[in-house]
Image (cartoon, rainbow, N blue to C red):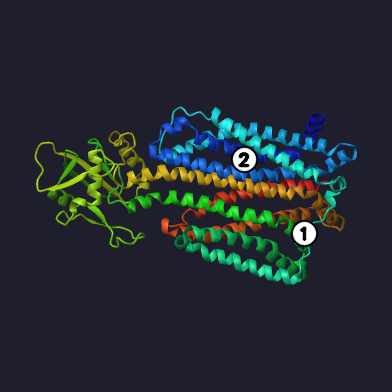
Amino acid sequence: MLNKIALKSLRQKWRDYSVLVIGSLIAVAIFYMFSAIATNEPLLKSMSTMTKQVIVIVFVFGEIFLGIITFVYLNFANNFLLRLRQKDYGLLAMLGASKRQVGGLLMRETLFIGSIATTLGILVGAGLTKLSGQTLMDLIGIKVKHWAVLTPKAILITIVFFLIVFFLNGMYNRWRLKRVDTLTLLHADETVKAKTEKTGRQVVLGLLGLLILGGSYALMPQIPKLQMTGMVIALILNGIGTYLFVGQTLGLITNWMRHADFGQRGLRLFLNGQLRFRLNEYKRILTMISVLFGLALGAISVGQGYYVSLPKQAQETNAVTLMMRNPNAETGTLKDVTYQAEIKYRLHDGQVDFEKQNLADAKVPTLKYTQPDDANAKPKKEQLNVNAAHADEDYTLTTWAAYLAGVPFGAKVNLVEQLPKNDVKTFKAVSVRDMQANQKPLEKLYAGELRYTDHGNLMVPGAYGNFVMLKSIFGGLEFMSVFLGIAFLVMLASTLMFKVLSNVSQDRQRYQILKMIGTTPSAARVSTIKDVGILFFIPMVIGVLDTVFGLQSFKPIMVDPYIGFGNGLMIVGGVYLLYFVITVFIYQRLVLKK
């Protein structure tokens, strides 16, 4: 009987439930994608050992973090389900159904929705895995011919995780339902949750919130010096400051607007009242969304920043662009070449001999740190002096020698006056002004060196070889940061959407009053946009400020910590705006319907 009631309820309110299903489906799809990539054997086998370890750690960490956020998100989503049906549950209880039976009905509806979302989410996740997998392979520079997007291991992990999550959320909602009496359920839509704050207390706490939030921003640039302690203190201060700002400082602003001429024009008095009613109930969720919005934007910005700055970083730490052992290497297609030479060498007993005069004629570029004790000092490019003391320990020569000897590092360099005529070989070295402008020819030249790199265990010397190695590490980080950031943002925006829609019955009554006093339909629609927009705007602004100040802490380890901020803001802003539009559309249909 309860199964029939649950199914009938799903059919009758499918529009409302579809919001919950789609939000849960997205969470399942992204979780499955991370599981599929982290456990994909063909992908892992095609990577070098170092890249494989980095990718697995990155995606397992991302999956754990995503799982925690998903659990919190689904708790809010299922709370939306409870708020949506609480009046119906009250009627069932009034007609004689026991709390146990009503709780069982809620559990069944939760599991029905969870099963649908998990099944569809895995299918959507498989498509997302296929698309994102190609993106990841392009980022880390590998090719996988046979890569299954539907793997039993990833499917099992996803099903088990979400069944547990939906079951626990169902049990929690059932427990909450049992604690509420029938009369409260029947009149839940009529409950007003506004809370009156004492003016003096609000002024003190409001100013304190601004002070603490500003203090967290002032502390963020000092995190590199204070290390973990500074980061923990900054996060705690930021959370407390945001909570007080949303709960108290904004309250001061709404009180000022009640008496100011600015707040009396048009429907501003109504919108200000809406915000005053909501602040006490929304302060926790707006605080959480503000902080995690900043973390999501920061993660995407840092990931993008690292990846965008890789070519510059690689060129700053290498004297030449590429060294080539391949005798058939052709450099004629390279643009804006700044250096090119052929270097003679002799390899014997793990030792590499270079001829001094040949190196001098080739004007070999090398790097020298003018301030070796400064960790942030950048090396200066200069010509190798073959007659200088310890010239055989020069960084450029030792990296060339290691590659020629077929070892990762430690090959001995010997500078001789003249090489013997037998066993002498040559290799090429070339530098270009802009690696990105020469991406295709450099990629072809690098491919010609792969037979010398022992299946990826050796790095080809030069800026481009270093770039490929860095890309294999930071490509996975960029991929994870973008998708994990979007996953967090989707769930946070969905949580805010569910929170707004769960209070729609109270808002409907207020908009009906607006209609009765003569407000036109067009003015009411504009009012709904502003009403919902305020709730989306508050955490967005705080989150952007968190990111702007938080990126200062990455200055010691990034060339420019803000280089990826623009791209990150476009990605985050686009997703957030999409959710705002969807929320407004659903909200208008619910509060303005006749």
Q: Which residue is at a point 34% across and 36% down the rendered structure image?
A: 456
Q: Residue at x 65, y 60 (%)?
A: 243
In 3D space, how far apart are the residues under numbered discs 1 and 2 (Cα atoms)? 31 Å
Q: Residue 287: where, in percent of width, then height? A: 65, 56
Task: Tell me the SS state at disc 1.
Answer: helix
- Nearer to me, 361 or 152: 152
- Looking at the rendered structure, the kind of residue marked 1 is Phe
Q: Residue 402: x percent and y percent?
A: 24, 43
Whether residue 455 is situated above or below residue 241 in the rendered picture: above
In the picture, measured across the screen, residue 146 lies left or right of residue 329, that is right
Measured as percent of width and height from the top left, residue 471 is found at: 40, 44
At label 2, counting other C-alpha atoms closer than 10 Å, the crowd grade (few under 14, some 14-19, many 20 or more) is many
Residue 27, which numbered label? 2
Q: Give above or below for 197 relative to 132.
A: below
Quarter holding the N terminus is top right
Q: Nearer the viewer, residue 580 or 378?
A: 378
- Label 2: which secondary element: helix
The residue lying at 76 percent from left, 42 percent from top is 175
User: Is residue 558 in sight in this rendering?
Assistant: no
Q: Where is residue 192, by image quadrant?
A: bottom right
Residue holding disc 1: 277
Q: 154 left or right of 581? A: left
Q: Three-letter amino acid code at disc 2?
A: Ala
The residue nearer to you, when weighing 362 against 300, is 300
Instruction: Note whether 463 is above or below 389 in the view shown.
Output: above
Residue 126, located in which quarter of the rendered image?
top right
